[in-house]
Amino acid sequence: MSELWSWSAEELANAVRGRELSAAEVVGAAIERTQQVEPLLGAYLDRFEDEALERAADIDRRCAAGEDPGVLAGVPVALKDNLNLEGKPTTCGSKILEGYVSLYTATAVERLLDAGAVILGKTNLDEFAMGSSCENSAFHPTLNPWNRETVPGGSSGGSAAAVAGGSVPLALGSDTGGSIRQPAAFCGVVGLKPTYGRVSRYGLVAFASSLDQIGPVSRSTRDAALSLSVIAGADPRDATSSAEPVGDYLATLENGVEGLRAGIVEEVDTSSLEPGVKENWEQSLRTLQACGVEIERISLPHLPATIAVYYVIANSEASANLARFDGVRYGHRSEQAGGLMDLYLESREEGFGAEVKRRILLGTFALSSGYYDAYYGRARSVRTALRRQFQQALTEVDVILTPTCPSGAFGIGEKIDDPLSMYLSDIYTAPINLAGLPAVAVPSGLDSKGMPLSLQIVGRPFEEATVLRVARAFERENATSFCPPLGTVEGRGAAEAG
């Protein structure tokens, strides 16, 4: 049953729980598909095929004994490699953590396992989640299943490529400024960034602690809703996680959106979008109107400053968080060091890649004496003002709409030497992290090159149910199948060869 790779997580779990399929069949099909497509994509850094089959057999034994293994019973899941899984490597796509083995499991991953999920492997990412193309990994780039001469987006590019390529129906990523939504957009899948605090960050290697959030990547809004119901909720091990009650996000998903108000932002200049992207954006609005959504204009005056604000705050927090990677306790330790200071300098020089070094330097400068108030302090003030503007706007409308990205996926190497152009890929997504709001990226069509485009739907804090309901209505009305032209693979693919 090799076609099982195309089933949704919900369908697979229901079939396993109903004993129409065995978990072993499901996981075996996922492994077979992964072996076919992984040489083409390079989506993974590590795969756990033997352990996955052992866990599937255990789930089948539980089902045979009359137990319910959980709502994700037998579902193959991939994890971005900045999420800890006990006994398995966590590299964050960096040489500085090469050889490190996790001593514990992240809360979100524990909850997946408790729901019966099967972890198939750890996926590639931009080093320490810093990037928008998955080209900054220390190990290899990941390629887009739609066109392997283009990037899958980042930093959760491996997770998005694994889902789009059919390796798994569901993966976890992390989103600091768009790192779930942007790769989901580029790969034609669904990416959900929950409200800050909705999902515990315990076990997620920190990039920017006030911005990071774990969320799912899936091929449908139903699977995104199902997985969020599993991983959301308070955690005593994460002081920033919220005690806000977790609902059944599937329960209201099909309720429709008649009379809901959606805001489009005056400060979002869609006139400069590429023709195909602009046309798709306008068609997306018409599609939602056909669903019964009322479109209104809103204003967020501080929105044009958000990329500058985001990169000051994110890099400052990264500078502090990455100070722990010093060659002393774990990870890479330079053999060239002659003393303690040399140990710090050489280990970090050898272990970190160029983009991580760039961001540490920028963040350290912004936090330094004499510049703190001018950069970090001012950025925090603008962030507070932006949050208030979002709060006010969301009293006038139920959701806010933007394109997820200003373009479809760009070419491998096209922006790697132009950091500013790369950073502007997050122009629509980064403001949402600054405000701590929930947002979902849902496929909206294809550009003139046949590459996926995406609509971003933003909601009020902890109203993921509304965001997902709008995404589901759009998904139903759009009624387009987004399947990358990626078939069975023979021999070495570009990712493996590169």
Image (cartoon, helix red, strand yellow):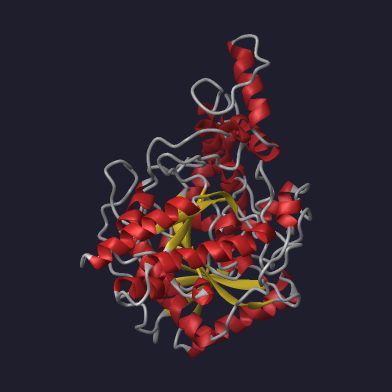
Residue, far top: 339
Extreme-left residue of the structure: 66
Location of residue 200 in the rendering, given as x and y in whole percent from the top left corner: 36, 49
The residue depicted at 47 percent of the width and 48 percent of the height is 212
Q: Which quarter of the picture shows residue 444? A: bottom right
Q: Relative to the observer, which residue lies in front, 86 or 470?
A: 86
Nearer the observer, 263 or 408: 408
Task: Please indicate whether residue 190 sits to the left or right of residue 137 in the image.
Answer: left
Q: For residue 117, which quarter of the picture? A: bottom left
At x 30%, y 71%, the residue is 17
Q: Residue at x 67, y 55 (%)?
A: 424
Residue 31 as seen in the image, left or right of residue 244: right
Residue located at (45% from left, 82% from top): 473
Q: Nearer the viewer, residue 84 or 121?
A: 121
Q: Position of residue 469 (x, y in %)?
A: 40, 76
**Is 50 above or below relative to 396?**
above
* Left or right of 33, for residue 141: right
Identify whether 487 is placed above or below 94.
below
The quarter holding residue 189 reads bottom right
Q: Is residue 107 left or right of residue 362?
A: left
- Tell which of 168 and 179 is nearer to you: 168
